[in-house]
Amino acid sequence: MIRVVTLDPFDDKQLAKFNRTLYTAFGVGSEHSGSAEVPSGMSEPLDAEKLLDEVKGIRAYKDDKVLLLTSRKLKDRELPSGKAPTVGFARYGKDRAVLTIAPYKDLETGYKAIARHALHQLGTLWELHHCLDPRCSMYPPWTPSFNQGDHIFCTFCREKSEQKIRLAKS
Ligand SMILES: [Zn+2]
């Protein structure tokens, strides 16, 4: 299942809606699994890769995917095309990703874009690749149009994620 672990305070109702969106997208349970501390000494903007390595106290079982959610900014990353603002980061096929709601003040304000980025990061954990369909959440997230899209997958990516989730369970 998907475990959302918060690193900052979030509104419970907004989190519940967010979990329903993740459940709808992946067909797998999603719940707020408590909070964790940003390691002492780490300041904003947070280093996404370091966060994934160093956040402690996450309770997760085998095959769970953990999404760390923060309202703090993440440090820009160097891409071949230059510096890109980092909304989220996930290691392909692993069990943890991080997502920021910045620059929005809460989940609700930026809901569509935040949910779309969440699908993208969790999709990466389930080994989805970037997708050429601009409507799909696996479309490259640094493209200017990405934030305008819906939090959905194309048929191909949806089927691939369902297949990966089934394989992980068996
Ligand atoms: Zn797709």
Image (spheres, grey):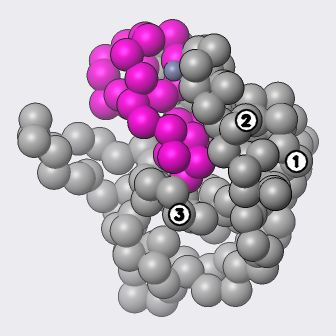
The quadrant of the rendering that contains the C terminus is bottom right
Q: Can you tell which of label 2 and label 1 is closer to the viewer?
A: 2
Residue 67 on the magenta span: no
- Residue 39 appears left or right of 4: left
**Residue type (three-letter) at the residue carrying disc 3:** Lys
Packing grade of label 2 (10 A; few <14, some 14-19, many >=20) is some
Callout 1: CB less than 8 Å from ligand 1: no
The magenta segment is: 119-146
Q: Nearer the viewer, residue 96 or 127?
A: 127
Q: Which residue is at 43% across, 11% downward?
A: 134
Q: Nearer the viewer, residue 170 or 50?
A: 170
Q: Which residue is mark 3?
A: 94
Asked whether the beta carbons under mark 3 and mark 1 sit within 8 Å of each other, the answer is no
Q: Which residue is at 52% across, 17% downward?
A: 136
Q: Which residue is mark 1?
A: 29
Percent of width and height locating residue 122: 59, 46
The quadrant of the rendering that contains the N terminus is bottom right
**Residue type (three-letter) at the residue carrying disc 2:** Glu
Q: Earlier in the sequence, mark 3 or mark 1?
A: 1
Note whether 64 is above or below 164 in the view shown. below
Secondary structure under tag 3 reads loop
Residue 135 on the magenta span: yes
- Residue 42 appears left or right of 110: left
Q: Quadrant of residue 144?
A: top left
Q: Which mark is residue 162?
A: 2
